[in-house]
Amino acid sequence: MNKQRLIAIVIATFFSLLAVPMLRGMMLDTTQAAPTTNLETAKSADAFVDSMGVVTHWSYPDTPYGFKYEEVKQKLAELGLRHVRDMLTPRIQDLAAIGIKSQVGVQPNEGTPTEIKEAIKAANKPIAAIDSVEGPNEPDIFWERDKITYKNQGFPEGVKAFQQDLFNTFKNDPETQNLIVIGPAVGKSYDYNTGSPLGQNTLNNYVDWGAFHPYPGGGNPFSDPFRYNTIEKYFWHGNFPAVNIDEWPYAFDVLARPFGKKKMAATETGYNTSRTGISERMHGKYIPRLYLEYFRKGIVRTMNYELLDEWNDPDNPEANFGLLRNDLSPKPAYTAVKNLINLLKDPGANFTPDSLDYNISVNPPPEYDRTQYLHHLLLQKQNRTFYLALWHEISNGDITSRPAREITPPDIPVTITLKTPIKNAIAYSFDDNGNMSSQQLSSTSNINLNVQDKATILALEPQ
């Protein structure tokens, strides 16, 4: 839906000169404890898989979405993602027939909230194909550019009025009240003092989920400029998935303000692999980490932008955000995501995950002493097998050059001590092409691993 992905990067750099949050601007303690734990309750492995989605553009006839639809649909089915984000298109029922739900973005120039609701109801038959409806996409860019208004009001007041009416219209109809209504996500960056132009807590009563677009590719200038990992200003010029949602959580602090305490959906995020973007190798490392990292931080839906490269134009960043190349051959990220889903999917009845008693100790190599960057996510399937994902949340790119200078950090030696009795342990890892391999582990109580900048997943079967 967005054809100007680099705007936010430029504006973020500009606003970085205006304001950095004072409380977060103090030098961080590099001796922060490693991510050790004792008794931790797992999250559902299938809930993680269900949080994953991808942006599509079925209405673009000059791209493979249009002229190679059947092939693209097959690639999407093979990928295993269950959710796509798009507009209201004739493809929705066809996708639902293969188990893919649609998140539909709407605008007031498509009709009144009531007219939109009736169109959604019609598109949702005979198969329940749509699970969520999303408010205006990046209205701070597109409403002003396209002169869109609602009730004679432009951005931001018209957007807020439209979102209120949209939410109330859907929730007051028994046929649509269970659809998830998602808020509008702005497309530019705003400093801490100014905040989101949509205001503070203005839409928390008119969304089920808030929305933001925390693209990590432009770094995070709203942070302390310390040197690390060969990057002079690490968060400013790093491009790792957690750059703006974790240690310096600009996206939550500023972009989530209109939605109060509502859960957040990343309705767009991702990286481009153009000549001025990142390499496909780096992309293949980042995208699985992005899905894991966002779920770890409580983001309920992550829509990677996007399924395929729209055109065969390596000089155009907008044309190279895909998991698939323009000829529909898979990038490493596509293969890695497909393998990640195949390992962790676990559809079926809901269950209450168990707790795992364990701890992680880290023995970092020289110059990589920020052990808090060893991240993990504990999941469990219905058969009670735990899946412990570990990764070094480190920047593989320095964006002071274009394309980003590629960095290969050392592995991080860790020891996982398991106090819960485990009868079988298998380690799953990715290569640079996204292929997954497995290794049977001899120890089920003390596991030594070299954690890479690609996710490693331990399958732990309790006794």
Image (cartoon, rainbow, N blue to C red):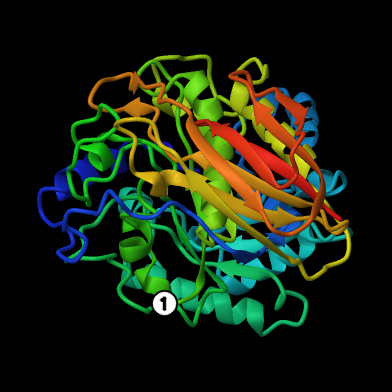
| Above or below, comparing residue 192 to residue 448 in the picture | below
x then y, percent, for residue 137: 46, 54
Q: 387 left or right of 382?
A: left
Query: Which residue corresponds to the image point at 17% horizontal and 43% vertical from the top-left?
Result: 225
Query: Which residue corresponds to the image point at 88% horizontal and 65% vertical from the top-left?
Result: 349
Count of number-bearing discs: 1
x then y, percent, for residue 32: 33, 54
Locate residue 237: give its quadrant: top left
Q: Which residue is identified by label 1? A: 260
State the quadrant of the C terminus. bottom right
Query: Which residue corresponds to the image point at 24% horizontal and 57% vertical from the top-left?
Result: 190
Q: Amino acid at mark 1?
A: Gly
| Above or below, comparing residue 374 to residue 6 in the picture | below
Q: 231 left or right of 134?
A: left
| Residue furthest bottom in the image | 172
The residue lying toward the viewer, choosing from 176 and 414, is 414
x then y, percent, for residue 184: 45, 62
x then y, percent, for residue 179: 69, 70
Mark 1 Cα shell of 10 Å, populated few (<14), some (14-19), many (≥20): some
Q: 87 left or right of 232?
A: right
| Above or below, comparing residue 421 to residue 440 in the picture | below
Would residue 59 be visible to someone looking at this image? no
Would residue 339 be visible to someone looking at this image? yes
Say what secondary structure mark 1 lies in: loop
The residue lying toward the viewer, choosing from 399 and 130, is 399
